[in-house]
Amino acid sequence: LAIKYTPSKISEEILSGIYQKELRYRISLQGAHRDDLSVFLGERSLEIYGSRGERRSALLAIKRAEMDYLTSDDELPVLLIDDITSELDEKRQNLLLDLLEGFQVIVTATVLKENLARKADNIIRLAEV
């Protein structure tokens, strides 16, 4: 997995040229939030050639690396994952759950699959309203 970072082009000249437009539209048109990350698996761009599951797996691998970076002796980060059952096959779900062992993770799912239930310390079911 390789990540290519491309910063947005920003300068005082650019910022002064778009200031009125940003005020009018009430959005920031330039800045770090416009930077870009491209993720590659070998030479393949996952954005262009990756399956949905491959892109999701790559994102989760990056999140795991962030968790390793943010973990200290007295604090663990919390990872929130929304509905891994819809985009990851069971093999990838199990690999992900193994990778996240020992971390604080909150997973939402519309369907509680057996492999998720076996790994969970606590399951909270929300009733339909």
Image (tube, helix red, strand yellow):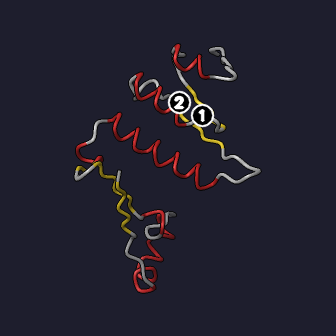
State whether residue 54 is above or below residue 68.
Answer: above
Name which residue type carries label 2. Leu
State whether residue 75 is above or below residue 118.
Answer: below
Spot occupied by residue 42 in the image (x, y as percentages of width and height): 26, 50
Task: Name the residue carrying label 1.
Answer: 101
Spot occupied by residue 105 in the image (x, y as percentages of width and height): 62, 35
Q: Is residue 109 left or right of residue 15?
A: right
The residue at the point 41 percent across, 77 percent down is 10
Name which residue type carries label 1. Glu
Residue 97 has which mark?
A: 2
Spot occupied by residue 65 in the image (x, y as percentages of width and height): 52, 50
What kind of element bears circle 1? loop
The residue at the point 52 percent across, 36 percent down is 99
Question: Would you call the spot at circle 1 few (<14 residues within 10 Å), some (14-19), or many (20 or more)?
Answer: few
Q: Is residue 89 left or right of residue 121?
A: left
Spot occupied by residue 109 in the image (x, y as percentages of width and height): 54, 23
Contact (CB < 8 A) between labels 2 and 1?
yes
Q: Residue furthest right?
A: 74
State whether residue 90 is above or below residue 39.
Answer: above
